[in-house]
Image (cartoon, helix red, strand yellow):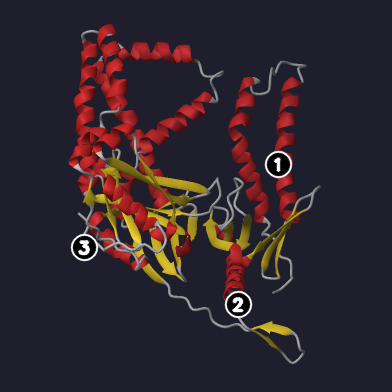
Amino acid sequence: MSKEKYKLHPISAVINFVKVLKDMIIPFVVVIAVNGFGGSKDSGDWSSYIMYGIYGIILIFLLVSGIIKWKRFRYWFEEEELRIEYGLFVKKKRYIPFERIQSLNYTEGILHRPFGLVKVKVETAGGGATKEADAELTAITKAQADQIKREMLQAKNKLPIELDDSDEPVVVQQPVKEEKRAVFKMSRKDLFVLASTSGGVGVFFSGVAVFASQFSNVIPYEAIYDEIVVFIRFGALIVALAIFVVLLIAWIVSVVLTFINYYEFTITVEDEEIIITRGLLEKKKITIPLSRIQGIRVVENPLRQVMGYATVIVDSAGGSLAEKDEKIRLLPLIKKAKITPILQEIFPDLSFNPVLTKIPRKSRKFFYRLDYVWMIPVSAAVSYFFYPFGLFSLLLFPLSYVLGVWQQKTAGYFLNERQLVIQYRLFSKVMVWMEKRRIQSMTERTTLFQKRANVSSIITTIKSGVTGDSTTIPHIEKSDAEMLLNWYEPHRRVSIEKEQPLD
């Protein structure tokens, strides 16, 4: 491998500056606002000029630190490792063996595209102990990014080495076999449905609330409250119209943001890797090795279930704590009828046509009875102190019963020699596929009340992100729970159930 040291593109200095500035912008604005935007501007008062001078010095310092970070950053390839050197006062080196690299994720931001650059995040199997990726190359050319991938593939494939006329070892540049095939591309219609049902309205108002909390000392809440009181006096119709306009604006904002994030969402499969590309302003390319995928989830919230849509999520092992996609949306939104052919093409060894063993009817009471423990005193107190309107709290009991029946009828499991499928519902219906070899642990839990009914719950855990994710098969027959534990034990075999298409 070449020991030549490579630098990042100079635009990295600007990107580092913008990144730090973005993290500091809210506290920076708060400090300026609290100090009266620079203090008094009376004649002879130099405090305002001093404050503005301090702000200018801080901005210059941030820009200089970005330049220094770019100047001191180097990376190169040596002894089948990606080696990185950085730091000003304390020089740091990081060596990452190529065989440990699980994925290379690419991002093309607004500052990258004009120069044909990408940001590369390097993720390893043992990564995730910190909040950052194992390595991040802020801005390099696409050719350099391809070079990193070639070096990684050469190291992993152990390509043969020959001697040339000068007796120097030369790596034989054998072509790497790539089978690239497009699997899925989200249509504009599905993208619009995703944006409309994504729950982004709540995120919008949460963001507004967080932003407003930063200016709690500046915002005149009393004056705003007085204005709202005056506004309410105009009548219910005007208030309802105003609320509708606010919700409409929030919905439009959420649709636009979702459209920007998932624009041109495409899935391709290449070299035993799933490659997801998406984004309008910032184009992201996420690479997921098939070997890292621990589980597959099909999620249907009630609204999308009525419309015949679902979301497919994969649980991926590894990843950093800061990575939001440890549960990656493989298919953000898709017609349920189209799911099986796509998943079968990506995961040919799994069966996606299970016949579920349902939860027994005698277990129905376990789905709602525990809720009555807290609902009875709460409902009694509310009914007493807020009589007669408090009596509406009694509706919690039939609603809890209906939800429990709904959950019991949805829950079930399917088992064959190599995989376990679990279906359950809180509000959204979830179906989980797990290979036996991916399950980290399986636990049987039996409470005193379950023991009397001769039922148990099975808890399975798979790796997800840097920790794990548990899924429960609730209140199944005791004999079925023991059968599942026997199936999970090494060298055990169970009869393969018949199969039929998903409902």
Q: Position of residue 96 (x, y in %)?
A: 66, 61
CA distance separating discs 1 and 2: 44 Å
Outermost residue on the right side: it is 89
Q: Residue at x 23, y 34 (%)?
A: 404
Please name the amino acid that badge 3 sits on: Lys
Q: Quadrant of residue 28?
A: top right
Q: Are marks 3 and 1 in contact (CB under 8 Å)?
A: no
Badge 1 density bin: few <14, some 14–19, many ≥20, Cα 10 Å: many
Rendered-image quadrant of the N terminus: bottom right
Query: Which residue has dot 1 on it?
Result: 62
Query: Which residue has dot 2 on it?
Result: 158
Q: Residue at x 25, y 17 (%)?
A: 236
Query: Which residue has dot 3 on it?
Result: 498
- Classify 443 as above or below 148: above
Q: In the drawing, what numbered circle is on residue 88?
A: none
Residue 311 falls left or right of residue 112: left
